[in-house]
Image: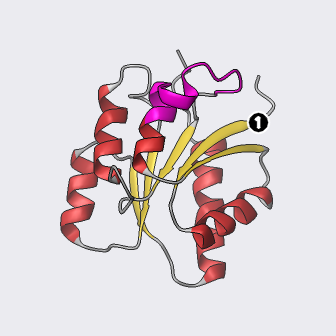
Amino acid sequence: MKDSHAILLVEDNPADIQITRRALRDGALPIHLIVVRDGQEAVEYLLRHGQYAHSTDWRRPDLILLDLNLPRVNGREVLQRVRSAPSLSMVPVVVLSTSNRMEDVHESYALGANTYFQKPQDFNRFVALLQVIQRYWLDTAILPPQK
């Protein structure tokens, strides 16, 4: 069994990155947090291209936390690429977005998101949400084994 779960955070907002780090650090499970700051870097990490092609510390994430509004490649395209890659298609993807537009929600689920949350503006609620996500996806849900 692994000594920690790997979470890939795809987020360009430094404040949200810090909140996520804190929430996961204070959670009950050991987490290896991988942070990429735009959609292009996320695709390169997930598909092991570019700077990640020969990385010795690369880990397939157990969970992806994905913002939609990202520079270079948006979150929708990242989600589409994740779901089209056989080695990643079963990795849970949780969309965390400031948007509450029904079009964004519908499109995210249509592209294969497992869950969609609007990011709370309140710090404590955001931390609580991240801890619920962590407990549910990494401690409660039964996920398929990694291939």
Q: Where is residue 106 in the image (x, y as percent from the top left)?
A: 21, 58
User: Residue 27 lies in what quarter of the image?
Assistant: bottom right
Q: Residues within 10 Å of mark 1 (few under 14, many from 20)?
A: few
Q: Where is residue 34 in the image (x, y as percent from the top left)?
A: 64, 44
- Farthest residue, direction left: 103
The relative height of residue 56 versus residue 132 in the rendered view (above or below) is: above
- Depth order, front residue of 6/142: 6
The verdict on residue 57 being magenta is yes
User: Residue 130 lies in what quarter of the image?
Assistant: bottom right
Q: Which residue is drawn at 21% across and 47% down?
A: 110
Amino acid under disc 1 = Ser
Q: Which residue is drawn at 75% across and 65% down?
A: 22
The verdict on residue 32 being magenta is no
State which region is magenta.
44-58
- Depth order, front residue of 119/54: 54
Callout 1: helix, strand or loop? Answer: loop
Q: Position of residue 95 (x, y in %)?
A: 41, 56
- Farthest residue, direction front: 51
**On the rendered image, what quadrant is the N terminus found in?**
top right
Residue 44 horizontal side relative to residue 136, left or right: left
The relative height of residue 41 versus residue 72 in the rendered view (above or below) is: above
- Farthest residue, direction bottom: 122
- Depth order, front residue of 37/141: 37
Q: Which residue is drawn at 52% across and 54% down?
A: 37
Q: Position of residue 102 (x, y in %)?
A: 21, 69
Task: Give the labeled residue for mark 1.
Answer: 4
Residue 77 horizontal side relative to residue 86, left or right: left
Residue 90 horizontal side relative to residue 32, left or right: left
Q: Which residue is drawn at 35% across and 47% down?
A: 113
